[in-house]
Image (spheres, rainbow, N blue to C red):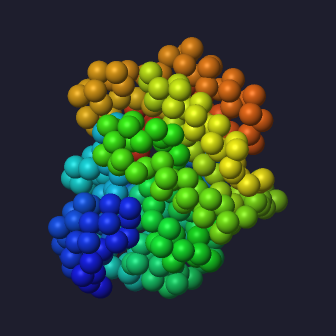
């Protein structure tokens, strides 16, 4: 498929994208490019479970944060194999056959039209997780209504100045606010199966950034004031300096125990339902290898 005027994400760059090439912000064509498709055990317990989440890491991103743990594929785009719609559907079915609790689409926005077609072709019906940076277009999200069972967005910033500095997105806050609410509308309250696995719902993640506890507290306040009942919040402490973090000395370190405790205490005071990640998760060992696993033989 060819897109003459791409408006899939809030960048709204209007680029022409052929199946194999694109000159827009993402710099990719419309055919999906996949860096890894494998069982993943490091998501929240109700996503990974005992058998793992069938995670498809797409190359490219519409946000490209300077500190991204997946910088190699999100921004540098040094790993990835282009696949067609039928091949992507086959990837979904292979992950399901391996016992995956769900199909987990990581940074999928730039390939949504192809993903929609692949989801319609898949044979095995397990929950679909849309795992993104939270910087989405409402029009694109609405196309996914009925196809996505679980939304897993980041809610990175409550301050557009920070969003501009670290993600080049001066309109992050208003887009993320609107999209989180649309995701919650589509899925409704969290639902679980007999194993305690999430089968439907929205879980909003917030990553604590070094030196930015005010941003975290403001983000949690907004979520507390605006999220419908039944939407989960996951507080993440896994930050380690990756990508181009070294160019920003103030975030070129892990968060401190004091920073972690300050934000965690605020989360508990708000009585938000969800998960809290331990500081020990801040390790390179939790970043999966982007080695074309699950796609090299297609």
Rendered residue at 26%/50% (across/down): 75
Say which quadrant the N terminus sits in: bottom left
Total tally of numbered discs in the picture: 0
User: Does residue 192 appear left or right of residue 291 in this picture?
Assistant: right
Residue 69 location, quadrant: top left
Residue 247 spot, x, y in % from top left: 23, 28
Rendered residue at 26%/66% (across/down): 13
Q: In this picture, is 277 found above or below 8? A: above
The answer to whether any part of residue 116 appears in the image is yes
Nearest to the observer: residue 200 or residue 173: 173
Rendered residue at 28%/27% (across/down): 248
User: Does residue 233 appear left or right of residue 238 in this picture?
Assistant: right
Q: In this picture, is 76 found above or below 260? A: below
Residue 42 spot, x, y in % from top left: 55, 43
Residue 89 spot, x, y in % from top left: 46, 78
Say which quadrant the C terminus sits in: bottom left
Q: In this picture, is 111 found above or below 167? A: below
The answer to whether any part of residue 34 appears in the image is no
Residue 165 location, quadrant: top left
Q: Residue furthest right?
A: 194
User: Does residue 96 appear left or right of residue 81 in this picture?
Assistant: right
Nearest to the observer: residue 262 or residue 11: 11
Residue 222 spot, x, y in % from top left: 63, 42
Residue 97 location, quadrant: bottom right
Rendered residue at 68%/49% (across/down): 226
């Amino acid at each position: 498929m060819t897109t003459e005027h791409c408006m899939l994400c809030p960048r709204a760059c209007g680029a022409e994208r052929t199946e194999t090439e694109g000159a827009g912000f993402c710099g990719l064509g419309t055919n999906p490019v996949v860096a890894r498709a494998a069982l993943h055990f490091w998501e929240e317990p109700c996503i990974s479970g005992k058998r793992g989440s069938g995670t498809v890491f797409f190359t490219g991103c519409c946000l490209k944060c300077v500190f991204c743990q997946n910088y190699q594929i999100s921004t540098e785009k040094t790993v990835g194999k282009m696949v067609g719609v039928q091949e992507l559907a086959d990837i979904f079915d292979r992950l399901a056959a391996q016992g995956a609790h769900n199909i987990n689409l990581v940074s999928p926005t730039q390939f949504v039209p192809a993903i929609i077609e692949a989801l319609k072709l898949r044979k095995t019906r397990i929950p679909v997780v849309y795992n993104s940076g939270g910087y989405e277009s409402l029009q694109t999200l609405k196309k996914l209504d009925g196809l996505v069972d679980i939304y897993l967005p980041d809610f990175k910033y409550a301050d557009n100045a920070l969003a501009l500095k670290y993600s080049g997105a001066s309109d992050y806050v208003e887009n993320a606010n609107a999209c989180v609410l649309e995701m919650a509308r589509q899925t409704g309250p969290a639902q679980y199966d007999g194993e305690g696995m999430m089968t439907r719902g929205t879980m909003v993640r917030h990553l604590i950034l070094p030196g930015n506890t005010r941003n975290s507290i403001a983000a949690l306040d907004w979520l507390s004031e605006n999220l419908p009942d039944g939407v989960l919040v996951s507080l993440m402490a896994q930050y380690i300096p990756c990508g181009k973090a070294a160019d920003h000395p103030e975030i070129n370190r892990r968060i401190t125990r004091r920073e972690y405790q300050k934000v965690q205490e605020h989360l508990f005071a708000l009585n938000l339902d969800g998960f809290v990640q331990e500081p020990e998760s801040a390790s390179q060992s939790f970043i999966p290898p982007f080695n074309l696993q699950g796609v090299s033989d297609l």
